[in-house]
Amino acid sequence: MKTVVVVPTYNEAENIIPLIREILNVSAHPEVLIVDDDSPDGTWRLVENEAKRNGKVHLLRRTTDRGRGLAGIEGFRRALSLGADRVVEMDADFSHDPVSLPVLIDASSSADLVIGSRYVSGGRDEDRGIARRLMSALARGYLRWVLGLSVHDPASGYRCFRREALEALLKERIKARDPFIIAETLFYCTRKGMRIVEVPIVFKNRKAGSSKLSVTTLLKYLFRALQLRLSCRAWREEPL
């Protein structure tokens, strides 16, 4: 079984090489695909040099039509073209610990989509203040209610897809160009009746660099969740 870990990046030069090496050292021995939106800090160049030394490292440099959502979709397609049986998506800032990769991959043997969750037994969201935790709880509840989701952590971007599930998902009209793609793809997975499970992870603050998510951006995403739900007349389709 071949696993490809897709990591969308923008200005992650401080994190990317240590992250790649940690991913390659986990017991599952996956390959890594970095999808970089032509980072001004040279993230893509560091990955390009690493790829020359290691055949398990791949670079997809995007110089036009950039955005987190578009990078995710293009990364998924490239991972499938590389022959992946399992495709994992994770962040580049070490908030998603590579040590959890084998757990997500193992759980995919009985699920179409595995979500690394902060809010199931054994999961944790570290280094967050009370205000941030409250905001997160309200956002999660809202997404679950509006989009009809049953998972505990609908905003988690640490996920593992089975190849067949991802192929089916990519047939949907996914529109998000930004991080809202996480909620949008989960919505479509739910509509298609996919088998979704959650496994516990410890979510940490980034090791280096600055966060790209603001309160204003979060509020826009919540409004878009309502737009997405209202735009879909049919609620559930046949399962895979």
Image (tube, rainbow, N blue to C red):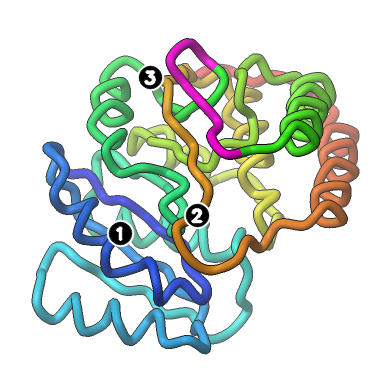
Which mark is first along the chain, 3 or 2? 3
Q: Residue furthest top?
A: 121
Does 36 sit above or below residue 146?
A: below
Q: Amino acid at mark 3?
A: Ala
Q: Residue 46: x, y in percent? A: 30, 82
Q: Which residues are magenta?
A: 120-127
At 52% from the left and 57% from the top, the residue drawn is: 73
* Label 3 with label 1: CB-CB less than 8 Å: no
* Label 2 with label 1: CB-CB less than 8 Å: no
At 37% from the left and 81% from the top, the residue drawn is: 44
The residue singled out by tag 2 in the image is 206
Which mark is first along the chain, 1 or 2? 1
Q: Amino acid at mark 1?
A: Leu
At 45% from the left and 71% from the top, the residue drawn is: 12
Does 138 sit above or below residue 97?
A: above
* Label 2 with label 3: CB-CB less than 8 Å: no
- Quadrant where the N terminus is found in the figure: top left
| Residue 79 belongs to the span the image colors magenta | no
Find residue 33 and report its image quarter: bottom left
Magenta residues, dominant SS class: loop
Q: Which mark is residue 19?
A: 1
Which mark is first along the chain, 1 or 3? 1
Q: Please tell me whether mark 2 or mark 1 is closer to you in this view.
A: 2
How dense is the environment of label 2, judged by Cα within 10 Å: few (below 14), some, or many (20 and up)?
some
Q: Residue 131: x, y in percent? A: 80, 36
> So how many labels did they put on this image?
3
